[in-house]
């Protein structure tokens, strides 16, 4: 079985490579803007790498050639870049997803497993979990969620126009991994974030709001979900998250601090002020998804894919905090620095290999039925 992974050097991509290394019948093609060095070691060494800027239309022809004979594509590539203009991110992420889809169609690849997100959902209720039938519109000012929803709409159109195409969407909660600790936090909150205070006993106060809560999932559990989706004949959407939901009280307990009620509007004002003070801080809408995204019912993934997380949210959070405390973290080629994150980024921060220069690919753009 040949599987191609876009964003293969990112957080989820690295975890998935490690998981696939235990599958003797799987051959992996890794696709990233900047590929690992040949001596990068495991899990990168046994992968056949292809360097491509997925946001560039010139990638289409060489990408289609590389996908020839592939049984499934796992599309993880997504740029999440604080401080970047939303229009630019939309061009890279939606355009990159369209290019991957068109290259698949040209190569005759029958199956796509797409990395969607919990943020693709419309705002949800505070008192119950929702299943995969909840509306997919994105949340308010969260460009990330709106763009994820737009890609899902594009995939729905493709499934209608090309009945032979089988699409599975994994709507995952934020993915955490210990060896991505500090790198991931700086990528999300800005390069000058004082990471040392995000350690147990260092942060006396944690903001709390009853609507500010979110589920998470460990990267290894997310990787298992992607493997099961690749091997399954099931299509459609699957929620992927661990329990319990992380809120201010739980985070304060893990950090050894106090949870203090804070109005959501004040959090937005503080974030806006941080954005003016730091060249790579998040936009002010970061708090809105956490306060509005629904909590996920993952029973369909358990029922149809046989997937259940092995680690609960507390363990995933503790591993990330431990990684933050024990070292600075190492960015993958796709997330080397906040100023240069590539479209080959699945999730911010990972213990990835050193990069080698990307090859520039050039080809004419084929006809695009979806753009």
Image: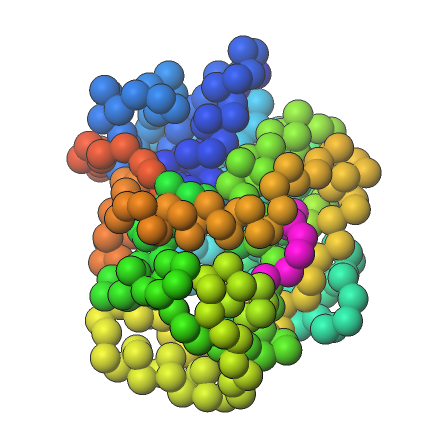
In this rendering, the answer to whether 67 lies above or below 342 is above
Please say whether residue 357 is visible from this viewpoint.
yes
Name the image quarter holding residue 338.
Answer: bottom left
Relative to 306, say whether 262 is above or below.
Answer: below
- 113 over 276 or under it: above or below: above
- Residue visible at 42% across and 43% down? 178
Task: Name the outermost residue toward the top.
Answer: 24
Residue at the (35%, 65%) spot, across then down: 202
Query: Measured from the top left, where is residue 269 in percent x and y?
Result: 40, 87
Q: Nearer the viewer, residue 323 or 347?
A: 323
Residue 130 covered by magenta stretch: no
Q: Nearer the viewer, residue 2 or 183?
A: 183
Give the left or right position of residue 218, taking residue 358 as reference: right
- Left or right, 272 with respect to 311, comes to left
Position of 128 with respect to 19 (left or right) is right
Quadrant for residue 201, please give it: bottom left
Residue at 74 percent across and 73 percent down: it is: 125
Q: Residue at x 55, y 46 (%)?
A: 315
Could you tell me residue 238's position as x and y percent? Answer: 70, 46
Bounds of the magenta span? 240-246
Residue 275: x percent and y percent?
30, 78
| Image-based side of 15 in relation to 153, left or right | left
Number of marks in picture: 0
Residue 87 visible? The answer is no
């Amino acid at each position: 079985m040949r599987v191609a992974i876009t964003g293969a050097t990112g957080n989820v991509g690295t975890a998935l490579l490690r998981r696939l290394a235990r599958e003797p019948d799987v051959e992996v093609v890794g696709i990233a803007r900047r590929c690992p060095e040949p001596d990068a070691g495991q899990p990168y060494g046994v992968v056949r790498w292809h360097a491509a800027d997925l946001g560039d239309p010139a990638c289409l022809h060489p990408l289609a050639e590389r996908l020839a004979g592939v049984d499934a594509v796992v599309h993880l590539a997504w740029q999440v870049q604080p401080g970047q203009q939303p229009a630019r991110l939309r061009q890279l992420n939606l355009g990159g997803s369209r290019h991957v889809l068109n290259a698949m169609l040209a190569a005759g690849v029958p199956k796509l497993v797409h990395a969607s997100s919990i943020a693709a959902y419309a705002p949800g209720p505070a008192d119950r979990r929702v299943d995969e039938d909840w509306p997919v519109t994105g949340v308010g000012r969260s460009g990330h969620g709106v763009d994820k929803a737009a890609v899902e709409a594009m995939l729905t159109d493709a499934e209608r126009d090309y009945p032979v195409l089988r699409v599975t969407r994994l709507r995952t909660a934020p993915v955490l991994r210990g060896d991505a600790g500090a790198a991931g936090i700086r990528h999300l909150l800005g390069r000058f974030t004082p990471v040392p205070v995000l350690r147990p006993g260092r942060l006396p106060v944690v903001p709390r709001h009853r609507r500010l809560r979110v589920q998470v999932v460990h990267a290894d559990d997310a990787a298992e979900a992607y493997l099961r989706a690749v091997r399954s004949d099931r299509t459609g959407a699957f929620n992927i998250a661990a329990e319990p939901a992380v809120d201010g009280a739980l985070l304060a307990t893990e950090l050894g601090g106090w949870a203090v009620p804070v109005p959501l509007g004040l959090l937005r004002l503080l974030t806006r002020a941080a954005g003016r003070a730091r060249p790579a801080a998040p936009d002010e809408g970061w708090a809105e998804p956490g306060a509005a995204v629904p909590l996920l019912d993952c029973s369909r993934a358990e029922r149809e894919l046989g997937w259940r997380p092995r680690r609960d949210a507390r363990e995933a959070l503790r591993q990330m905090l431990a990684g933050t405390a024990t070292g600075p973290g190492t960015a993958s080629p796709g997330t080397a620095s906040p100023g240069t994150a590539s479209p080959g980024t699945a999730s911010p921060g990972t213990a990835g290999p050193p990069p080698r220069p990307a090859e520039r690919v050039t080809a004419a753009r084929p006809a695009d039925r979806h753009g």
